[in-house]
Image (spheres, coloured by chain):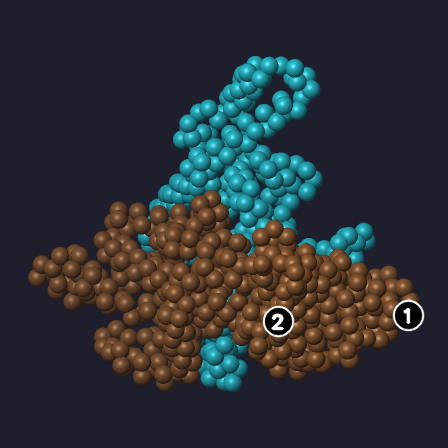
Chain colours: A brown, B cyan
Amino acid sequence: MSSAGMEYSLKGILREVLSYKSGLFGILLLIFLVVLSIVTIITIPYNTAINLWRGEEGIWLENPKNAQPVWVKYIVGKNLPENIVLDSKKAGTIGITKALTEIPGTDFKKVYMEFTFTYDYDDFPSEVNIFFDAKYTKNAPILKIYIIKPGGIKVDLTNYILRKPDDILYLSINPIVSQNLLIHASSVVGKQLEEELPIEMALFAVEDESLANVGTLKVLKGVYKIVIEGTLFGKESDVDAKVVIYGKVWGWAGTDHMRRDLGIALLWGTPVAMSFGLTASLMITILHLSIATISGYYGGWVDSLIQRLTEIYMIIPFLPFLIMIATFYKLDIWILLAVIIVLSIFGGGIKSTRALVMQIREYPYIEAAKVYGASNLRIIFLYIIPKILPPVIPGLIGAVPSYVFLEAGLSFLGLGDPYLPTWGKVINDAYNNGALYKGYYYWVLEPAFMLILTAFAFSFLGFALDKIVNPKLREV
Amino acid sequence: MAIKGFVKFAVKRGITLYLVVLLSIYITIVVANMGGMIDNFIKSQLLFDITYQFKRDPEYKDLPANELDKLIKETYKLEIKRRGLDKPFYIRSLVYMKDAITLDLGRALYLTSDTGSRSVRLIILERLPQTVMLFTTAMIINFLTHIFIGLYLSRHYGGKLDKLFIALAPTSVVPGWFYGIFLILIFASWLHILPYGGLVDVPPPKDPTLYTLSVLKHMILPLASWVISGFFLGCYSNRTFFLIFSTEDYVEAARAKGVPPRQLEIRYILRPSLPPIITGFALGLIGSWGGAIITETVFNWPGLGKVTYQAINAFDTPVLVGVTVIYAYLLAATVWILDMIYGIIDPRIKVMYGR
């Protein structure tokens, strides 16, 4: 069987590809990625994805920072805390009560909100915040917040006057809460403690000598109550509170330093990477093919000109040029793609194809076409290019990963698309925020896994195709 | 006749290559200056500096505002003229061009060498050793292992090991810097046995032996990432390359004649496959001197790639042009030398210039 002369039908090629293990592997991966891309684009439209990723309007406020994916629980075999959200607007659901009583003779009101929840995780939460939503005209509500730990131990946290109707009390960084907890811990331990404890840990810690320092704190499992009570001023006044006890795991992909759901970037990275890699590879291959054919077919000064141009391209440093242009002009991903294509027009692929064309040019059927008066363009595009196409296809598929990684590399340097979430950008964020130092491995591993999956899909398929169109590889 | 033809060939090739270098350098100058836009940055920075200088100087405190403005403007104009920024970009680009091709690399705008010098030549020379140490070593290790393992595989083709290399060859599409991240994750972050990056420990050990050891320790991961990345594909393609040569008719004929396998391998397979291997080695060697921007960033390795990246971020055109010029000259010289070697060795080219 020879590669020239053989007719390829799509079905035939597919059957042959599937007969190779690497081909089968590549095709399966590719199908998975294509389906994933389509589902992603349909379920999270482009604009939604960008808005979600830019985190406008604080959509992510209730997510924990740098939370690992939920499934990490099963890997480490520890029941890591998930988010607990308790909203007084949902009073009446289990564990949440809210009571407003007017004080007779005044327009003051008493408010009492109680949030009961069971905490049976093996680790401390990462943060505790209270989001208020109040209505008042002149005087802001005065609130007292305390927690009742399992066993009925009451710990006063703070007295709080709202600064604005939609105030947020960052409980875990509040100095007064910290002081109060220190006083409480000192009384439990029985001596004056010096070092303040991390609030979200002290709140959920066992009440004994272990409160003496951070290292010995243990999680106290059981039923907790957070109580917010206080006074409102004015007839129309009201207050609602949402207590968020941030976990350490969130979603199937985890979150980043800006509380964003990494899942969005992982999903959206797929269509972006695939279309970027494929377009780049396809365009560059077509350009190389046409230029090489023209160079090899016409010969003479056209050929020397093209040869000199490829030499110039060889000397011009590709990556520094690309980075320069990307830095100077802050490109979005599609213009970046165009720049990559332009910077590769006269790249290395031309030489080998040109040699092939020069052989084919001497074939009798080309002679025949010339004799009966076919135009040069007709010969090039209808007789020569189809002939050299098969050996080029595996290269086309096999080159896709290099462009996917090129985009990832540029994003890693901080030169990626400013809006679109891509895998390279996630790795860049992770790197810049010291993910590897702090042990947030999921943050790097997830996008890396997707990148490798995409790269392998194309690369394995490319190798299988290579064996089909270059039988010489199969024989040896 | 042949010698005269060869000289003609050499000179002709030299001139074409030199023209190619000139054009590449000019393109670099235009791009690195953003077609002259960098000038505007420099000018506004200059105006800012001068204004700041005058406003801070107590001597000019009592001067009326409009007089001070005039003074600032005059100083600014003089400074622009002194630096030649009053001439249009295309004229200055030719001046830059002349400096570049005569290797007068000039002074950096912002970057400095470790000794505090602004000389582009010093900045480049200071970083080059680190880059050569890392990437040239990686390149040579890769080159040798790929050839020897490739030869071994071609000798035992169809074996288990051969099949393994064929199966794993597609994994080499993952670039070195990407493997680097994994290596850092495993060996630095998780196991804590190797450093995250950098050239030596901080503070650097005073004792030269300890210093060398520290540098070597820092080299392990970046080196490993480049070796791993190219390993399977490199061995696989060398194996295929040798196999294709070993199925040539003249090899079959020699084998039939009873040439011993060892001799067959050296004389009939390795020798004719040498030219493309040498080309690959020479170009790889030169390529390794340019450093690797992303790998050096991942490992915080102070080489040429990192300096290039810093220069890009600081819009430091002279450094960018300097790096490109040196690289262009080296590459062109290598290509020319290779052409000459083949001109002497390869009978096909001999025929061409003999005509």
Q: Depth check: give the residue in front, B211 or A189.
A: A189
What x and y, as percent, mark residue A172?
70, 63
**Chain ID for label 2?**
A
What x and y, as percent, mark residue A186?
86, 67
Q: Residues within 10 Å of mark 1 (few under 14, many from 20)?
A: few
Residue designated by label 1: A190
Q: Depth check: give the residue in front, A38 or A6.
A: A38
In the rendered structure, which amino acid carries the disc numbered 1?
Gly
Dots 2 and 1 on the same chain: yes
Q: Is residue A295 visible?
A: yes
Question: What SS does tag 2 mark?
Answer: strand
Residue designated by label 2: A98
Quarter of the picture containing the C terminus of chain A is bottom left
Q: Give above or below for B34 relative to A379.
A: above
What x and y, as percent, mark residue B312?
53, 45
Q: Residue at x 31, y 84 (%)?
A: A15
* Tag shown at residue A237: none
Disc nearer the start of the sequence (2/1): 2
Q: Depth check: give the residue in front, A422 or B129.
A: A422
Quarter of the picture containing the N terminus of chain A is bottom left
Question: What SS does tag 1 mark?
Answer: loop
In the rendered structure, which amino acid carries the disc numbered 2?
Lys
Q: Residue at x 43, y 80 (%)?
A: A25
Residue B184 location, quadrant: bottom right
What x and y, as percent, mark residue A158?
74, 61
Q: Give above or below for B112 relative to A173.
A: above
Q: Distance from label 2 to label 1 (Cα)?
A: 36 Å
Q: Residue at x 53, y 67 (%)?
A: A261
Q: Residues within 10 Å of mark 2 (few under 14, many from 20)?
A: many
Residue A206 location, quadrant: bottom right
The single residue placed furthest to the left in the displayed view is A372
